[in-house]
Structure formats: structure tokens, C-alpha cells
Image (cartoon, rainbow, N blue to C red):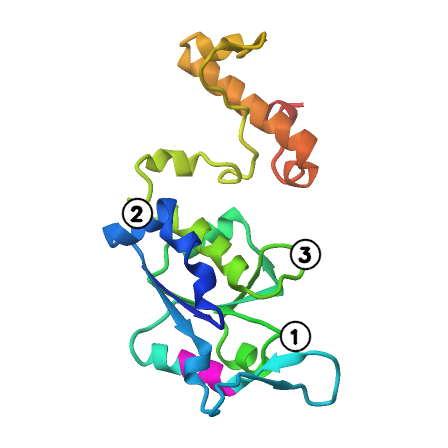
Amino acid sequence: MRIDVLTLFPQMFDGPLSESIIKRAREKGIVEIELHDIREYSTDKHKRVDDYQFGGGAGMVMMIEPIAAAIESLKAQREYDHIIYMSPDGQTLNQQTANRLSLSGNIILLCGHYKGIDQRVRDHYITDEISIGDYVLTGGELAACVVIDSIVRLIPGAISDEESALTDTFQDGLLSAPIYTRPAVYNGWGVPDILLSGHEANIEKWREEQAYERTKQLRPDLYEKIKSPSEGKK
């Protein structure tokens, strides 16, 4: 997979893309991530990329010309499955979206700034708009890091235990069951006996029941979409 990121602040990606799973995936050649400074595509002598919006109003807007030039330059080199704009009014990122995007070959992520980008970019270039939540960030860079992380960890070979990714929270629409590790007793707090029993079938049944119960309590919105097996029999 190749991910090209269009941004005004490439250095914001230095830490997130140079550590942990993403770092190892890049070193293995599993994913190629390239950062492109949108200012380099500006024809303005001062490398200006923003201007006042037509019709008046507060806030500057990223101009179409440098963004279009950057996208056209990349599209001339390869085909892209998705050109994604990180936007607070985009579709909220979820596990299903991450799963879908992880199957892509090439992706462009566009990070907005200021008041946003010229609408014509969204109308003629963007294939997907993604938000990471109902709030506004200074720019799309942090959101793009979240999207990249959610995608890369799903690519085969990115993590050593691929089964782990397939049993993560939200993969089946549920929250995960409680998890424990050594010691079995700490400060008088013990681990549920079932997990120490060695009975695989009973443990899996317990985990499934706990996943449904946790989802019902903590995320009733998700629970309404997936009823527990016991309730389905009532």
C-alpha cells in the first residue's frame, strides 16, 4: 500500500510515522508513506496557499490551485483508489471504514487548514471525506495520523499476531471483553476464575457474554444494532 499525504505541516508526522507498528511496517516495505508540502505546489512567489473567501466572512480558505496541482501531479504517476479529505463534516471513522481502506492499493490524504478548502476541490477531486469526531482541530494532520494508524495495523504483516487485530474492539461491532494478565492476584484483586480454568470453550463463551454486556452498558447505541444471543432467543 502507498499513502500520500498532502499537508502544510509535514513535520507534524515525524513522531507518529516513526514509531511502533507504522515504523516497522514501513521498514518491512508493507506500506509506503510519502509526505508532500502543499506550499511546494504554489505558484505564488511567497508560496501562499490561502486567501479570503468570496462573499466575505471570517477565516481564510486554502486555494484550489496548489491543491489541484499536487493531486494532479500524484495522479499522473499512479492510480488512486481513494482521495480522502480530512473534514469535521465527513463520515465518522469507524472500524468498518478502516477495514475497507486497508484493502486499498494507493490512497491520498488531504489535510485541510484555516477555514477549510475551496469547495471545488471537494467537488472534483475528493472521493471520500472522513472525520474522527464531532469537534474541530487546528488542521487535518492529527486526524490523518489516526486514519493512517487505523489502516496500517490491519495490513497483513504489519503486526506479528494478525489474529489480534481481528479480535479488536469494534471488529464484530462489539466492545472487547475485560482482559487480564499476571499476577493472578494483586493487592487482593483477583482475576476471574474462568480465565484460569484452562477450559477454552467456557472461556470463549464468557468473553462473548462479557463483550455483549459491556457493549450494552457502555455503548447502548452499538448494542441496539447487535443484540446478544441470549436476548435473541427470548
Check residue 6 in the rendering and tell me which mark sits there, or answer none: none
Q: Is residue 224 left or right of residue 91?
A: right
Does dot 1 land on a helix, a strand or a loop?
loop
- In this view of the protein, can residue 154 be seen by the observer? no
| Number of residues whose C-alpha sits closer than 10 Å to that of mark 1, classed few (under 14), some (14–19) or many (20 or more) | some
Residue tagged 2: 24
| Number of residues whose C-alpha sits closer than 10 Å to that of mark 2, classed few (under 14), some (14–19) or many (20 or more) | some
Please report the bounds of the magenta region as a residue range.
65-71
* Residue 93 inside the magenta-drawn segment: no
Residues marked 3 and 1 touching at CB (< 8 Å): no
User: Which one is earlier in the sequence, the residue at label 3 or at label 1?
Assistant: 1
Q: Is residue 54 left or right of residue 201?
A: right
Residue tagged 1: 115
| Number of residues whose C-alpha sits closer than 10 Å to that of mark 3, classed few (under 14), some (14–19) or many (20 or more) | few
Does dot 3 land on a helix, a strand or a loop?
loop
Residue type of the residue flagged with mark 2:
Arg
